[in-house]
Image (tube, rainbow, N blue to C red):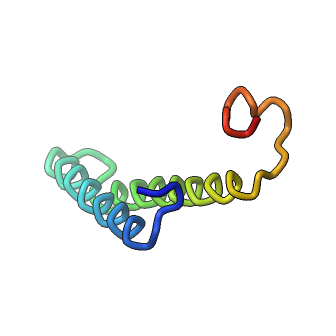
Amino acid sequence: MSLIPVWQDIAARLLLTVLAGSLIGLDREARGQAAGLRTTILVGLAAAIAMTQATILLGSAAKIRIPLPGWTCCAFPWAC
């Protein structure tokens, strides 16, 4: 898989997120816990979309070689 995901990768990630969120949500609803099916799916989708955006933005920043502040060299070795 490339550093920047193509639309098939993004669709597969979101589909798997909905599947995992629905399984966890159904289990929580069966046990009578507060966060059920809809909440679990929405939280999972929000996290998956945020991580996909971060992956795309970091991939494009690596190609452009934007000068970053000095403290990020410790966090991102590729930035140095």
Q: 20 and 76: which one is in front?
A: 76
Could you tell whether 64 is left or right of 44 in the image?
right
Question: Quick one: quadrant of the N terminus?
Answer: bottom left
- Image mark count: 0
Residue 49 vs 32, above or below: the answer is below
Quarter holding residue 40: bottom left
Q: Residue at x 52, y 55 (%)?
A: 3
Q: 60 and 22: which one is in front?
A: 60
Could you tell whether 24 is left or right of 68 in the image?
left
Q: Position of residue 63 (x, y in %)?
A: 69, 57
Q: 68 and 22: which one is in front?
A: 68
Residue located farthest toward the bottom when viewing the structure as drawn: 7
Q: Position of residue 50 (x, y in %)?
A: 54, 56
Q: Residue at x 76, y 35 (%)?
A: 80
Residue located farthest toward the left when viewing the structure as drawn: 30
Q: Residue at x 31, y 47 (%)?
A: 34
Q: Position of residue 76 (x, y in %)?
A: 67, 35
Q: Position of residue 35 (x, y in %)?
A: 33, 50
Q: Residue at x 66, y 59 (%)?
A: 60
Q: 12 and 33: which one is in front?
A: 12
